[in-house]
Amino acid sequence: MAVVAAVRAIKATNGFLDGLNLSSPVLTLAKEGTLQQLCPKLSERVILIVVDGLRVDESFRMKTLNSLRQNGTEVIASSHYPSISRPNYVSLAASVPPKVSGLRMNFSWNRLSVDTIMRVLRDSKMTSAYVGNESPGLPELFGSHLERGLGFNTAHFSTWQDGFRDSSLHVLEEDHAFIFLLTGDVDVAGHEFGGASEEYQRAAQKVDGILFEILQSIDLQSTTVIVTADHGHTDSGGHGGVEDNVMSVPLILAGAGVTSGAPISNASILDVAPTTACLLGTSVPRHSFGKTLTQAITLPLPTVEKVRKQDLRRIKNLQNNHQVALTVADAKTSATRRQRLVLCAIFLLLFLFLSYLAFRNGIVAVDGKIFMWGLLAFPISYYGLLGLFGQQYTLSVIPSTGDLTTILLKFGSASTAVFVVVTWLLIRDRKTLVSRLAAVNGVILAGLFLAYVPAMALWVMFPEPHYRVPSPLMIFMIPSTYAAVFCFASASALTLLLETTIFISRATAQKAIAQGR
C-alpha cells in the first residue's frame, strides 16, 4: 500500500504545475466584445522592451531607463499571478491575464487562441517583429503570422553572444509598426544568484548598456518606446508568487504620443497592449482586460472620454462573460469532486479495515511514546524546512527549470533521514524483531493515514482541469502535500528495511560470538 501511495503521489507532484495549464482559454466559452477604433495615430512605431525579471528598485540604477523616464513618464505597474514569464508575455501582447488565458506555467506547448496586438495590426495592414535571447516566448505561443494571423510577421531567437543586440538593431532597420524585444539575462541572474545579489545588478547594467546601443538611433519624435518587465524577483531569487518584489514592475513610456511627466495611477502590464493599439491608431485586441493609459497619451479630451468609456464597457463585458464561463466550468468541477470523494472514502475505509486486522493479529502495535514522537518527526521536519527555506510557502521557490518536485524532494529527503533516525532511537530497546517491527508499523500506518487525509482532501478539492487558479498558498501546498505522501512512504519502507537489516546483522554477530566461545 505504501508503494502504491508513493508512486501515485510522485506522479501527482510531477504533474500538478503543468496541470494548471488549460488546453484552451476559459474565455473561449464566453462571448467576445465588439470594439471601435477611437484613437488617431500618434506614433509611427512602438518598441516594447521587456526586461524579463527586472525589479523596480534595480530599474532605477539603469541610466538608459532613467533617461527615458526624464523624457517621458513612468509608473510602478503590477504583474499578474501566477507571476511566471510566459503567462505574462501573454498579458503584455494580448492583455489577457493568466487566470483567463489558461496559460499559468511556462512549460506548455498549447497554441493560444486569444486575440493579440499582432493580429490587430495585421488587420490594419501593419507588421510586427519579435527578438528574444533566452526564450522563443510569444512566437511559440501564437504561431506564425501566416499560420493563424495571431503572431509576429518575423521572429528572431538569438542566443549567441551579442545576438540580442545584433538582431534588435537589424529589426529596427526594417519597417515594422510594433517590435517586441525580450531580454532574459536579468532573469537568469535572478534565478541563479538572487534579486538582491551583485550578479543580478551586473546583469541589469549589462542590459542597460545594450539598450543604450539599441536606442541610439531611435527618433522619439516619431517612435514610442515602452519598457517594462513580466515580473520581478525575490531577494533570494525566484518568482511565481505575489511578493511585492515579484509583482511590482517598472513601466516607462517615452517618445511620440506620450505626455512627458504625466502622472499615471493603477497601471498593470495588461494595459500595454491597449495603449500600444491607441498609439498606433488601431482598435484594441478583442480580449483585452487592460485599459488604455490615457493619462500618459496626448489625446483630445473628447477622445479620452470615449476611450475610457469603451475600455470600461469592454472590461466589464469580458469580466461578466468570464464569470459565466466559470459558472459552467464550476458545475463540471463539482461533479468531479463528488466522484473523487467517493473513491477516497472507499480507500480510507479499506485502509482502516486492513489496519485493524493488522492490529488484531499483532502485526501492528501502539506504544504511546514511540507513537507520538515517531508520528511527529516527519511532518514537523518536512513542513518546518519548507517554511524556513521554501520562501514561506510560495510558488517563488520554483527555479528557472520549473522543477518544483526536485525542490520538494530535497526537503523530503532530509525529513526522511530525521524520521528514520528518530524511529530507530525510539525502538532500540525492544528485544525482538517482531516487537520492533510491530511498533514501527504502528507509527507508519498512523503516519500514512495523516499523510493521506490532507493529500486526498486537496485531490478532491482541486481536480483538473483547473478553471480557477488556486491561491498562492494552495498552489504551493498541493504539490508539497503530494510529495509528503511519497517521502513518508519512502521513509517508511527505508525504516523497515534498515530495521530488519540491523536486527539480522546483530543476531548474526551474536550467534558468531556464541559459536566462537
Image (cartoon, rainbow, N blue to C red):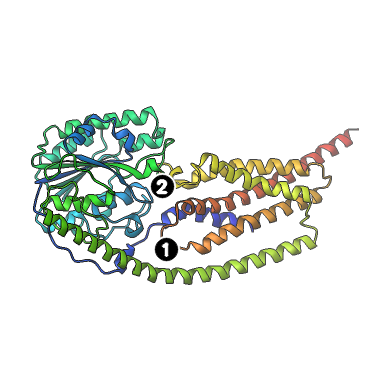
Picture residue at 59% right of the left edge, 57% below the top = 5
Q: In the figure, 328 relative to 451: above or below? A: below
Q: How many marks?
A: 2
Q: From what the image shows, is residue 333 above or below residue 473? A: below
Q: Quadrant of residue 199?
A: top left
How far apart marks 1 and 2 lie (CA) works out to: 23 Å
Q: Front-most of 299 and 450?
A: 299
The N terminus lies in quadrant: bottom right
Which element type, helix, strand or loop, lies under badge 1?
loop
509 relative position to 155: left or right: right
Circle 1 Cα neighbour tier, 10 Å, few/some/many (<14 / 14–19 / ≥20): some
Q: Going by the picture, which residue comes out furthest to the right?
A: 517
Image quarter of residue 95: bottom left
How far across and down, in percent of the image, does residue 475 sit?
46, 53
User: Does residue 157 appear anywhere in the picture?
Assistant: no
At 29% from the left and 57% from the top, the residue drawn is 111
Q: Name the residue: 80% across, 48% down.
A: 433
Q: Are marks 1 and 2 in contact (CB under 8 Å)?
A: no
Label 2 crowding class (10 Å Cα cut-off): few <14, some 14-19, many 20+? many
Q: Name the amino acid type tagged 1.
A: Pro
Labels 1, 2: front one: 2
Left or right: 470 in relation to 218: right
Can residue 102 be seen by looking at this rendering? yes
**Which residue does the numbered mark 1 point to in the structure image?**
465
Quarter of the view holding residue 452: bottom right
In the image, residue 287 sits, relative to residue 213, either above or below, namely: below
Q: Which residue is mark 2?
A: 242
User: Where residue 328 appears, x then y in whole percent?
Assistant: 38, 71
Residue lying at the far front in this picture: please name it: 301
Split into 4 quadrants, where in the image is the C terminus?
top right
